[in-house]
C-alpha cells in the first residue's frame, strides 16, 4: 500500500467560484484516497463552511489580507509542522508570497494554483522567474503562462474535477425544480450559469436567444447568476418578444439542483476562459453543452459528440446552434450520454485525484534531486 501524502493547501480568499470549487473537489478526492489534507482558510467564509463539512480535512484559520501578514504566515508554518507536510500549495494569488516564503523556511516544496489568465504585474515579473511551480487547469492556460516566462518544466496541467456521485442525471427532481422556477414541464430549457458580465458574452447570447426563441416556441431560458450586465440583459429580454420564456434567478452557492431543469447549457464567453467548470458539471448530469471556441473551453468537452463549439460573440452562429439543439431531441440525448462518459473518464474526482498523485510523485522526486 502506498504511503499517505501529507499536504497543506492555503486558500484564504473568502470567495466562491471556480478556484474554490476546484479546491473542494481535489481535497475531497485526496482525503478520500487516504491522504492527510490540511487547509488554511478564512473562518466563516463560504469555503471554510464547505470544508468544515468534511471531517477528514484539518482546518486552520488565517487570511493573507496583506502579502506577508505575520499571523497568517505563523498559521501556515504551524500547519506544515503539525503534520510534517510533504508539500504546500497556494490556491489564490494573494496567498502566493507568504506561502512560498514559509515553505522555503521550512524546507518544503511549494506550488501555486493559477486558475485564470492574469497575474499582477509584480508577480508576473518576479514570480514567473523564481523556482516555484504553477498548476493550471488547462493546456491553454499552460501555454499562456509559458509565454510569460515560466519554464515548461515548472507548469503542470491538472484539470478541474467533478464529483460524479453528486452531479449525475436527476430525472426524479426535474418536474419539481421546473415547477419551483416557473418553467413549463414540456419546455426545452437552455441554461446559463455564471456571472452576468461582459466577458461572459451574455449580451450577444441574449440576442441569440431571441433569434432562436422566435423560431422555436418551446425554447425557454434559465439565467442563474448576477452581475453588472443584469440591466442590459433584462432590457434585451424585455424587447425580445418572449420575456415570459426567460427565468432570471440570482446566484446560488449550490448550483447542483438547477441542472435538473435543463436540456442544454451554454457558456458563451467572449474573453478567454481558462477552463469552464459549468460545462463538465452539466455533462456529468447528461446535459449537452455549447461553448465558445476560445481559451480552455474546447478541453472541457468531447467536441462534436458531447458538446459543440460556437464562434465567440457571433449572435447568428449562437442562434443557429441553439436552434439546432432545441429542435432535435434525439441529438440532445446522444450528446448527453456522450457527456456522461467523457466526464467520468477525464474529470471524475477519483480520476483527477489519481492524476495528482502521479504528478506529485515525480514532482517531489525532482525536488529531492534538485
Image (cartoon, rainbow, N blue to C red):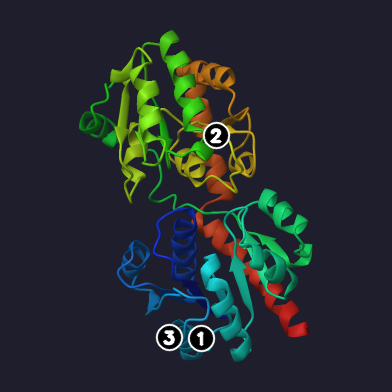
Residue to which mark 2 is pinned: 338
Going by the picture, which residue comes out furthest to the top? 215
**Label 3 crowd (10 A; few <14 / some 14-19 / many >=20):** few
**Label 2 crowd (10 A; few <14 / some 14-19 / many >=20):** many
Image spot of residue 226 (x, y percent): 36, 41
Q: CA distance from mark 2 to mark 1?
A: 42 Å
Residue under the image location 45 percent in, 35 percent down: 286
| Res. 304 mark | none
Q: 14 or 89, which lies in front?
A: 14
Mark 3 / mark 1, whichever is N-terminal: 3
Q: Is residue 238 visible?
A: yes
Please state which of the two labelled residues, at mark 3 or mark 1, is closer to the viewer: 3
Image spot of residue 237 (x, y percent): 36, 22
- How many badges with numbers are in the image? 3
- In the figure, residue 40 lies in which quadrant? bottom left
Vertical comparison of 254 with 180: above or below = below
Indicate left or right for 352 with 366 as reference. Answer: left
Image spot of residue 82 (x, y percent): 46, 90
Please state which of the two labelled residues, at mark 3 or mark 2, is closer to the viewer: 3
Q: CA distance from mark 3 to mark 1?
A: 14 Å
Q: Secondary structure at mark 1?
A: helix
Indicate left or right for 116 with 131 as reference. Answer: left
Please state which of the two labelled residues, at mark 2 or mark 1, is closer to the viewer: 1
Residue to which mark 1 is pinned: 80
- In the figure, residue 174 lies in which quadrant? top left
Q: Secondary structure at mark 3?
A: helix
Amino acid at each position: 500500500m502506498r504511503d499517505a501524502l501529507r499536504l497543506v493547501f492555503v486558500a484564504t480568499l473568502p470567495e466562491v467560484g471556480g478556484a474554490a470549487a476546484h479546491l473542494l473537489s481535489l481535497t475531497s478526492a485526496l482525503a478520500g484516497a487516504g491522504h492527510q489534507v490540511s487547509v488554511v482558510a478564512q473562518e466563516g467564509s463560504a469555503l471554510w463552511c464547505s470544508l468544515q463539512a468534511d471531517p477528514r480535512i484539518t482546518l486552520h484559520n488565517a487570511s493573507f489580507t496583506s502579502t506577508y501578514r505575520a499571523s497568517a504566515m505563523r498559521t501556515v508554518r504551524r500547519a506544515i509542522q503539525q503534520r510534517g507536510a510533504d508539500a504546500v500549495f497556494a490556491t489564490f494569488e494573494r496567498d502566493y508570497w507568504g506561502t512560498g516564503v514559509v515553505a522555503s523556511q521550512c524546507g518544503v516544496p511549494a506550488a501555486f494554483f493559477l486558475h485564470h489568465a492574469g497575474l499582477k504585474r509584480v508577480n508576473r515579473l518576479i514570480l514567473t522567474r523564481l523556482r516555484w511551480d504553477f498548476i493550471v487547469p488547462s493546456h491553454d492556460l499552460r501555454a499562456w503562462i509559458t509565454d510569460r516566462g515560466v519554464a515548461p518544466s515548472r507548469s503542470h496541467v491538472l484539470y478541474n474535477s467533478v464529483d460524479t456521485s453528486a452531479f449525475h442525471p436527476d430525472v426524479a427532481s426535474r418536474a419539481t425544480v421546473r415547477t419551483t422556477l416557473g418553467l413549463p414541464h414540456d419546455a426545452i430549457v437552455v441554461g446559463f450559469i455564471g456571472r452576468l458580465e461582459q466577458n461572459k458574452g451574455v449580451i450577444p447570447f441574449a440576442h441569440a436567444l431571441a433569434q432562436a426563441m422566435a423560431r422555436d416556441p418551446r425554447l425557454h431560458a434559465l439565467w442563474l447568476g448576477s452581475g453588472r450586465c443584469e440591466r442590459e440583459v433584462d432590457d434585451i429580454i424585455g424587447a425580445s418578444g418572449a420575456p415570459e420564456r426567460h427565468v432570471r434567478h440570482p446566484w446560488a452557492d449550490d448550483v447542483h439542483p438547477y441542472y435538473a431543469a435543463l436540456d442544454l447549457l451554454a457558456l458563451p464567453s467572449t474573453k478567454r476562459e481558462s477552463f469552464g467548470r459549468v460545462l463538465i458539471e452539466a455533462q456529468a448530469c447528461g446535459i449537452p453543452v455549447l461553448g465558445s471556441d476560445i481559451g480552455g473551453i474546447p478541453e472541457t468537452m468531447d467536441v462534436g459528440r458531447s458538446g459543440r463549439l460556437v464562434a465567440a460573440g457571433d449572435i447568428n452562429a449562437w442562434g443557429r446552434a441553439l436552434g439546432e439543439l432545441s429542435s432535435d431531441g434525439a441529438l440532445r440525448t446522444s450528446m448527453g450520454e456522450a457527456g456522461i462518459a467523457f466526464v467520468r473518464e477525464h474529470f471524475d474526482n477519483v480520476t483527477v485525484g489519481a492524476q495528482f498523485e502521479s504528478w506529485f510523485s515525480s514532482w517531489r522526486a525532482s525536488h529531492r534531486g534538485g
